[in-house]
Image (cartoon, rainbow, N blue to C red):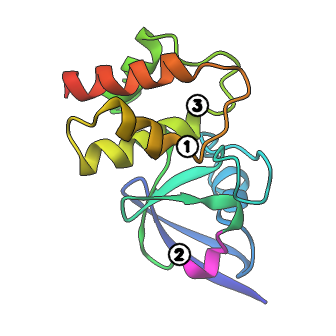
Amino acid sequence: MPGTFQLNVNGSRATVKCDGNTPLLYVLRNDLALNGPLFGCGLGQCGACTVLINGKPTRSCVTPIRSVGRLAIVTLDGLANNGTPNSLQRAFIEAQAAQCGYCTNGMIMTAKALLDREKSPTEAAIKRALAGNLCRCGSHNRIVQAVRRASVQS
């Protein structure tokens, strides 16, 4: 059923009109032109669509817009400061942690949530946190290095 939804995305308010069952991912990309989260599997299993909702990594492809309300949504697009990458994004660039780049959104958003909870995670903690994000290119070692680098730079 169509409705009007007020969202809090990347610190700004947005109003969208859509069916309440519309996945958050579609609203972010199609209505708000936020292209950080990507469509991967559409089943919430790969992590390409990950956003933070109240600081928790959430698969936006399986999150209906009606369930979000005014919760704080942060996308990859919202991590940068006036177009300047934040320390985690810079660490991914410096470690060359993106090969094809498809998993990068999910890896960064999941790592952001981890670093917000735990300032100096161990390598094992990083691997556990990122285990639900799929990377088919084999960039895992560089991704872990990037997260460790960001934890030291923060």
Report the amino acid beneath label 1. Ala
Going from the N terminus, do you reach mark 2 or mark 3 first?
A: 2
Q: Amino acid at mark 3?
A: Thr
Q: Which disc number belongs to residue 104? A: 3
Estimate how packed mark 1 is, as few (under 14), some (14 to 19) or many (20 or more) residues with alpha carbons within 10 Å.
some
Q: Main secondary structure of the magenta part?
A: helix
Q: Which residues are magenta?
A: 63-67
Asked if labels 1 and 3 touch by Cβ distance under 8 angstroms, the answer is: no
Question: In the rendered view, does 120 fall on the left or right side of 93?
Answer: left
Q: Between marks 2 and 1, how big is the CA–CA gap?
A: 25 Å
Counting from the top left corner in percent of width and height, residue 14 is at 51, 65
Q: What's the residue at 73%, 53% (across, down)?
A: 30
Between 97 and 20, the one lying in front of the other is 97
Q: Which residue is rendered at x = 32% and y = 24% of the image? A: 148
The amino acid type, in three-letter code, at marker 2 is Val
Whole-number angstrom distance, CA of label 2 to CA of label 3: 23 Å
Which residue was labeled with disc 1? 131
* Residue situated in front as seen by the camera: 71 or 50: 50
